[in-house]
Amino acid sequence: MKIDLNNFERFEARHNAPNHTQIEEMLAALGVSDIDELISQTVPEKIRLKKPLELPQPLTEYQFLRHFKTIADKNKIYRSYIGMGYYNTITPPVILRNIMENPGWYTAYTPYQAEIAQGRLEMLLNFQTMVTDLTGMELANASLLDEATAAGEVVHMFYGARKGAKKKQANKFFASNTCHPQTLDLLKTRCTPIGVELVIGEVADLDVTDPTLFGVLVQYPDTNGGITDYTDFIAAAHENGVLVAMASDLLALTVLKEPGKMDADAVVGSAQRFGVPMGYGGPHAGFLATRDAYKRQIPGRIIGISKDKDGNEAYRMALQTREQHIKRERATSNICTAQVLLGVMASAYAIYHGPEGLKTIAYRTHGMANLLKQSVEKLGFEVVNNGYFDTLRINTTALQAKAIRLLAEERLTNFRYFEDGNIGLSMNQSTDVSHIADIVDLIQDALGLNVAVNVEALAENIEIAVPAELQRESDFLTHPVFNQYHAEHEMLRYLKRLENKDLSLVHSMISLGSCTMKLNATAEMIPVTWPEFGQMHPFAPKEQAQGYQEIFKDLEAWLCEITGFDAMSLQPNSGANGEYAGLLTIRAYHEGIGEGHRNIAIIPSSAHGTNPASAVMAGMKVIIVKCDEAGNIDVEDLKAKVEKHSNELSCLMITYPSTHGVFEESVVEICQIIHDNGGRVYMDGANMNAQVGLTSPANIGADVCHLNLHKTFCIPHGGGGPGVGPIGVVADLAPYLPGHAVIDNNVGEKASTAVAAAPWGSASILPISYAYIRMMGGEGLTNATKIAILNANYMQSRLKDHYPVLYVGANGRNAHEMIVDCRQFKPAGIEVEDIAKRLMDYGYHAPTVSFPVPGTLMIEPTESESKTELDQFCDAMIQIRQEIQEVIDGQADAVENVLKNAPHTQAQVITEEWTMPYSREKAVYPLPYVQANKFWPTVRRIDSAFGDRNLVCSCIPVSEFEEAEA
Ligand SMILES: *Cc1c(COP(=O)(O)O)cnc(C)c1O
């Protein structure tokens, strides 16, 4: 036998799960002879791509990791003292391995199904407790995208909270010029479109009696490192009806008087330095804390405590009525995907170190700054900032700074270089005395100084240098959770205990329509925690980040090939942020060609809630267009509305294939109508998994499209984030893509202001999508799309006799997802929620509930599930259908039945007395496979309304805890 020496193990076969036999079986079930026949019945001929994707030949996992290491090596990791919101931090290995590198945590979905998400919900409650405690505020959300966007959210929040006379006339927001430059840039982005005038200046010069002023942002410690007591300033602002937010730093707040004590109205910041690597800009958890009074205005997700059916404490997402899913264009923000995994890591860091451990780290960091200050003063330099926690701005001249920079880079060290010649240095958890000695030597050598400075001797007598009135007096993190897991075994077991409460992709398929929960391959994940990627500061000189730059360049080119676009921005750090960036790009383009008055966004009624919410943030007026019976956009209604508003038309936002899971035939015509009327077409790319290699947004006629790399391109969901939402654009929009205030991200001089804090957003997870494309190749990716469509249609064929399938294409086919209707069970008292909860008893996470149609489930299997898994899920759905029939037929009790009582817990079925009219076995082992591999929900059905009425969003402190126990 001849041996083919080039026959290597293909990654594609690991990712696209159904094997050859399974594919044949599924094709037979669908009555088609091959997969291309199915595809031609599904994807309209006129939008099909005419040639295959041109991408590099696929690599095996082994080849890829070896190749990628050579790219990683092109990142030169220098010791960073740059600061500006990003600091070296030490990820405790127990957190690195058990959270960051653990699919049990990173493959989970957003915790909508709370009964099987108690682990991460508990950790997010810990996160909120940590943030409220350290900032001294009453309420915090469960993460935002980054510090700068959190500051942007504050503008919206304060603007919406204006009262009295301010409500009519106040449209001015003031930001201190000592905020980080990337934050100021983002405020510009956020203010202009909604008609808020942004004033940047000295706080001392601000007239708080200005009747047009509604809000202020200051930074504490500020970007120069200075610390100021804002108590009097805030009091004066409040007297004039002006709200004040402070951007702050969680580590500093273990030492410094907390903003709550100064009566701040909101506090924003980043939890990065709590154990999350810098990663060249992200992802990290931004936070926003505020007063209880603003609980209905606060953006993002809030976790609250409620109770389950047995009255046991249980967690779930609170006050969801504020969110874009329900409120749409009246939502408090467009936040959907946030930074759950990074929030989980940061709270784990706080739990592992505890209040005392955090203080030790903070005092040491502060002490290093003190040591450096004394040392450089001995060299004759002055520290210009007024007080400090960890950062010094040193009064060097431009000439001196130049010499220092030259030598510093030779010695693999980065400082911050101010425009006026000053240098800035920020200390961090990893700084030790020898590093301070190195810095002193470096400055002396660079400037030819020879001053006797004995750093070690100085280090013997370092004291806290925060003025007494700015020192923190109150306790924090007094809840038991922050005080009992400091030994590694205790921590390890706590993390495992939480992980075990959550259902993730390590257990079973999560067929979340629209969210594309596909395989997050281990080989794709491995480079994420390589130090060459993790330890790069986002504002390090680009020459040091050549590995990253190469990845960006390739990835942009590949995504352009896949989407058909001319340029790509990797900056947006979620899908919704991509929508916002894309709309701003259209807006800037229209302004650029003298048509800045165009401000109407047309959005189909079936659109995802983020679409209208983003349009409003981008300063647009939303006009809704209807869908017809078949779920397609009503072209006549569209035409009428477009023609009526043709002079003000900015864009159409459209999802393709539609949120109904169908490739609409009329899409090309729809795009033409928009273009003919001077508008641009924004495509929501969440459904890109049905397009790759078969058609493309540009081919269909779109001008801009965001991709959800955390859906289609394998970045894991992280339990609700991180995400990456790059946007692709056609050539004439490219000059207006988002730029960056600190680092030139290659867009050019017409670049818009930024939509994220870092120049390339969440850079450190881009290797995941890079790896996916590089290991699949063009053919593999195209096959993935085909299999995704095959899997969905196979499930349709199995389920359609049991549940009506809504909205199919011209040939009775679905795209990569389908909607099954559950509304017909309502008369028997069975709601779609009951089916979702009952699936938990079968070991499954429900598909998407009630989007885009209330009372339905939207199922998207993806290509990464084998026929075995699809069949098992279908068996569960079919069995549930029989259980519903028993209720309809009166065989089962209308109230005490397996559906209404789902999910069932272990505690419930082992009770001595079982009073249900059905058996325990039926409750928890409804099919044989379940018995072999049971996943136990840890709480019974959670009462959401109770939690919203009695909002509790943080852990209870030890004192009250002990009282309660007594
Ligand atoms: C997921 C999704 C979004 C939002 O993306 P995020 O990354 O969660 O912000 C927008 N539109 C559709 C159709 C989606 O499925």
Image: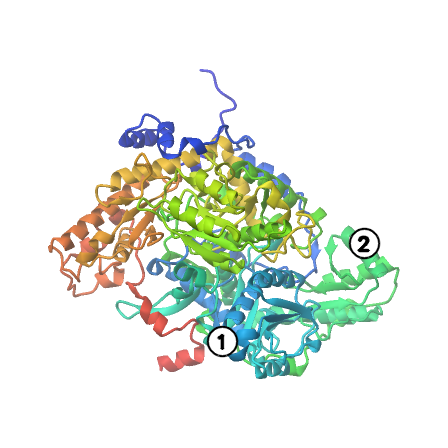
Residue 800 appearing in the image: yes
Q: Is mark 2 within 8 Å of ligand 1?
A: no
Residue 848, horizontal then vertical, whole percent: 35, 52
Colouring style: rainbow
- Up the image or down, 357 lies above or below 871; here it is below
Query: Which residue bears the numbered disc 1?
Result: 291
Q: Secondary structure at mark 1?
A: loop
Q: Earlier in the sequence, mark 1 or mark 2?
A: 1
Residue 408 quadrant: bottom right
Residue 905 quadrant: bottom left
Crowding at dot 2, Cα within 10 Å, few <14 / some 14-19 / many 20+, comes out as some
Query: Which of the image's four quarters has the C terminus?
Result: bottom left
Residue 335, horizontal then vertical, whole percent: 48, 59
Crowding at dot 1, Cα within 10 Å, few <14 / some 14-19 / many 20+, comes out as some
Query: Which of the image's four quarters has the N terminus?
Result: top left
Residue 232, horizontal then vertical, whole percent: 63, 83
Q: Which mark is residue 407?
A: 2
Name the residue at the front extreme. 644
| Number of numbered discs on residues | 2
From the viewer's perspective, is the residue at label 1 or at label 2 nearer?
1
Residue 493 appearing in the image: no
Q: Is residue 149 left or right of residue 903?
A: right
In depth, the one of 797 and 629 nearer the eye is: 629
Q: Amino acid at mark 1?
A: Arg
Real-space CA distance between mark 1 and mark 2, rounded to the nearest whole angstrom: 48 Å
Q: Amino acid at mark 2?
A: Leu
Q: Secondary structure at mark 2?
A: helix
